[in-house]
């Protein structure tokens, strides 16, 4: 959890209207029968999922305003109480969120292999344990529709495990292909939603994303 402040504009700070941005980062699943968070429901059961970011950046709508960098972050995506950021800033509008995913030693967590940028562990339907790990670097960009901004509303960045882990894990002899899918499918799995009730969970009436992840241009 982070509480940050940034001031921009003229010398009279009393005229500045502050914007509060809340961003929850968590795992989701649109097909729990294929990939569930926790115990298996017929497919994979994911007990741990982790992403390591060298930078998490809030991008203002105006090109004349500096972006807001939250620094390096590690996010455990399967937690009862998801991790979140809360930012109070004088920037009036944000139109994007960017995550630069890299192995970062300061993001180290117990049980996460050293050098991992992405890590998942869990059980298959037959009870067989599996782990997936990546040391690669990539970036995710989530932008509002043209002419829109995210506004002062709670946001949720969800990684859909049923998309990320579709078809995984592959047999050991296809380990290289398995690693490629693990990296590439993360992009398609990430989307930004409005957490309208602020409960840090993706509810049934909040399923329409306000932005989907793309690779930065």
Image: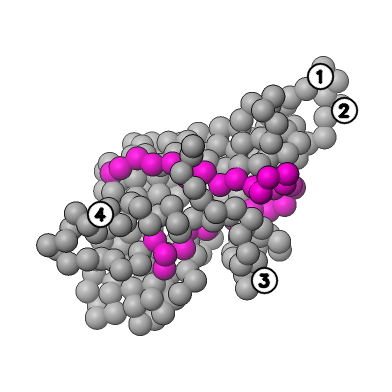
* Sequence order check, earlier mark of 4 and 2: 2
Nearest to the eye among marks 3 and 2: give it: 3
Does residue 135 appear in this view?
yes
* Sequence order check, earlier mark of 4 and 1: 1
Q: Which residues are magenta?
A: 135-164
Circle 3 Cα neighbour tier, 10 Å, few/some/many (<14 / 14–19 / ≥20): few
Residue at the top extreme of this rendering: 11
Nearest to the eye among marks 4 and 1: give it: 4
Which residue matches tag 2? 15
Which residue matches tag 3? 205
Image point (34%, 36%), residue name: 105
Residue 178 against residue 53 in the figure, above or below: below
Is residue 179 left or right of 42 when viewed as pictured? Answer: left
Report if the CB atoms under discs 2 and 1 are less than 8 Å apart: yes
Q: Disc 3 to disc 4, how far (Cα)? A: 34 Å
Q: Disc 4 to disc 2, how far (Cα)? A: 52 Å
Nearest to the eye among marks 4 and 2: give it: 4
Q: Which of the 4 image quarters holds residue 135?
A: top left
Dot 3 falls on a residue whose secondary structure is helix
């Amino acid at each position: 959890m982070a509480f940050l402040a940034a001031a921009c504009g003229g010398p009279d700070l009393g005229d500045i209207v502050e914007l509060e941005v809340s961003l929850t980062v968590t795992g989701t699943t649109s097909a729990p029968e294929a990939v569930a968070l926790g115990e298996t429901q017929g497919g994979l059961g994911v007990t741990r999922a982790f992403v390591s970011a060298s930078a998490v950046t809030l991008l203002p709508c105006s090109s004349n305003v500096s972006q807001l960098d939250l620094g390096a972050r590690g996010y455990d995506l399967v937690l009862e109480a998801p991790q979140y950021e809360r930012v109070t800033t004088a920037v009036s509008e944000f139109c994007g969120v960017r995550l630069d995913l890299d192995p970062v030693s300061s993001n180290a967590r117990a049980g996460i292999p050293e050098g991992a940028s992405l890590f998942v562990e869990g059980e298959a339907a037959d009870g067989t344990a599996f782990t997936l790990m990546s040391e690669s670097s990539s970036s995710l960009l989530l932008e509002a529709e043209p002419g829109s901004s995210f506004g002062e509303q709670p946001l949720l960045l969800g990684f859909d495990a049923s998309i990320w882990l579709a078809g995984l894990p592959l047999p050991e002899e296809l380990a290289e292909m398995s690693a490629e899918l693990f990296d590439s499918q993360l992009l398609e799995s990430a989307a930004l939603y409005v957490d309208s009730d602020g409960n840090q969970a993706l509810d049934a009436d909040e399923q329409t994303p306000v932005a989907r992840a793309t690779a930065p241009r």
